Image (spheres, helix red, strand yellow):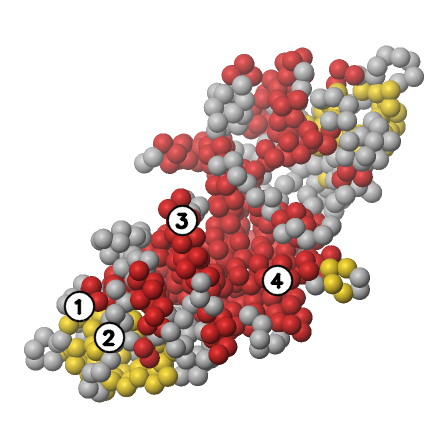
Amino acid sequence: MLSLTDEQVSLAEAVRAWASGRDFLAAAREHPGAPTSVRESAASAAELGLLGILSPDGGGTYADLAVVVSELGRAGADAPVAEIAAALAAFSGDLDVAGVEAGSTLLVPAIANPEQAGVEAKPDSSGGLVLTGRLASVAGAGAADWLLVAAGSEAGPALALVPASAAGLTVTRRETLDITREFSAVELDGVVASSWTPDDGLLFDVLAVQAVVDAVGAAGALLEKTVGYVKEREQFGQVVGAFQAVKHHAATMATEWEAAYSVARAAALALDGHDATVRAHAVSVAAAYAKPACSRIAGTAIQLHGGMGFTWEHDVHVLVRRVKTDELVLGAPRWHRERLVRLLGA
Amino acid sequence: MSDLDEFRAEVRAFIDARAPRFPVKAGVRSPETEEDQEELRRWTRELFDAGYLGADWPVEYGGSGTDSGERDQIVAEELARAFAPLPPGGSMLAAAAILGFGTAAQKATHLPAIRSGSEVWCQLFSEPDAGSDLAGLRTRAVLAPDGSGDYLVTGQKVWTTNGQWADFGYLLARTDPDAPKHRGITAFAMDMRSPGLAVRPLREMTGTADFNEVFLDQVRVPASRMIGSPGQGWAIANSSLAHERSGVAANVVTLRELWRALWDQVSGTNPDADVRQRLLALHADVEALAALVQLGTERWRAGVPKIADAPMAKLMFSEVNLAIAETAVELLGPDGIFVEGDSRAIAGGRWQDAYLYARAYTIAGGSSEIMRNVIAERGLGLPR
């Protein structure tokens, strides 16, 4: 069922209420790309149970987490809430779970965009891994205490836990299109990880879906703002929403959003399934459709806001930036389409 | 296997064994010969007899009296998957209208005949000047001056699928020109062999004649053939159109099969990255439409449909279908010019036919522009 459960509707309402008490978009304009309240936001999200939502006690599913992500995208939230939850669920090794769930210790996944080179791991003599490589952009790494690094090795892909303070590890904040979140480059030069687990590929798919769902959430906010605006803005003696050209733009936005929402929801549900091929197909289909669709919606949102939408002080461009960033990270549409070619067995 | 999976397997086997094998053509097409028409009557009867059509009808008219929504959808999907001919759409639409609004006598007369395929119905709704604005229809039905209570119908209808084969027409005509336009319309069962009624095949851009024009000149319809009451026609038409819902899910299957056929054709030719990208973007479009339709169907079954659900599905289906057909023809390159009947035609010319026919979907049943108006005005609440 693609329809939300009653519990998921309540969850969405709770997260929306939480986010509406924090003006993330205004804060982003104040400190573009360098959010100052990440720890506070994470701790506050922890009180709602969001960071540990996937734990046995949290009892949540990946589909539940996607409901949360959609609201975070809608609000332009600063903290890597969903990334933390996903990292916690992916790693079963030695870890301060209570501290991470409480938001006092920040753990984020450090995983390569699939178009880019990743991290190589070599075994050391004591059963650990030695990590070397460079990740061009990792969401939330700048504030993180721990990184869960996805690395390739001769023994297969691994998820290795390293402290941000580890010797040989450098985190450098990048300037990006998105001003709501912080992205940093992570360089690993012989970083030793004593704790690691095999990587079955689920974490990448989870994060890829989160990027899609985040874009859908932000695009949904843009659609609502746009429809509201064209009902009020008057030119030539009538509201601009009465012009058929504007109506058709709005109808196309709404239709593409509905399709993007639906296909993203299907992908989120597939994350909870057991078939990795079915999951990968659902994820890449959602990314291939919804990422560009949300960017089109965002572009039309700016267009229909006219000059107002072009100003720095307006919220629209802040969300447009986030949507476009979501499109490009964790597999740009082109990469996901190529993955579909492989999955369909050409 | 679940019950529904078993049902699907059973329907699939039935279609494989029993469906007429007409050449694969895009869309809803009229039989081209008397033999094909007879095959379609047989096929309609077999689908009803097997319980695959009309399962939701009352028991006294041969149904099982159950809420068969999921099974209806499976039947529609399996017919689409096999590119099997569909029972006459006009017959199914008329049956829904008669079941909902017909008299006991009308039900007793027409429902068994529709089931047996002995009555084929066409839909007499659209007019040359009432297409997207259907409620503006001008065909008049006036009481006969002889006091018999019969109506005399005069006007012109167009886009009549199966008009040349139909025994009855499900007619909308204006009975009260002074009423607001949606209120002055009445529904009738029109005998297509009545004096004064002429059917002329309408050849379309595909080169085939899948539609007809129907000319009505003082055609007499007995009062007993009125469906519902005077002025109720618009409501009846909307209600019976709502029964077409299972067709939306079937359209998704059609697009999946169409895309798969294109992929199978192209993927063996070592396509370059740009071609792969375009084809997989279309695949994602089809799957996104499938998800949109699924969510809309869930809302409809739960009794909480959104007003824009159906127009969005129609709009997106039409546009994606067009995009697949256009892409297919373009990718054929110079061989894309060869059509059915030419020995060089690829896949029997199906892509050229699909390309030409695709405009029927973007125009008929409310054009894409009308769909966008409906979505904006009724879905988003923009001013009319």
Tell me the residue that label 2 is attached to. Answer: A146
Discs 1, 4 touching: Cβ within 8 Å:
no
Give me the C-alpha separation between circle 1 and circle 4.
45 Å
Tell me the residue that label 4 is attached to. Answer: A226
**Same chain for the residues under marks 3 and 1 in the image:** yes
Q: Could you say whether the residue bearing mark 3 is in a helix, strand or loop?
A: helix
Q: In which quarter of the image is residue A78?
A: bottom left
Side (left or right) of A305 relative to B193: left
Discs 3, 4 touching: Cβ within 8 Å:
no
Q: Which mark is residue A10?
A: 3
**Same chain for the residues under marks 3 and 4 in the image:** yes
Q: Which amino acid does label 1 sit on?
A: Leu
Q: Earlier in the sequence, mark 3 or mark 4?
A: 3
**Residue A334 visible in rendering:** no
Give me the C-alpha separation between circle 1 and circle 2.
10 Å
**For the N terminus of chain B, which image quadrant?**
top left
Tell me the residue that label 1 is attached to. Answer: A95
Q: Could you say whether the residue bearing mark 4 is in a helix, strand or loop?
A: helix
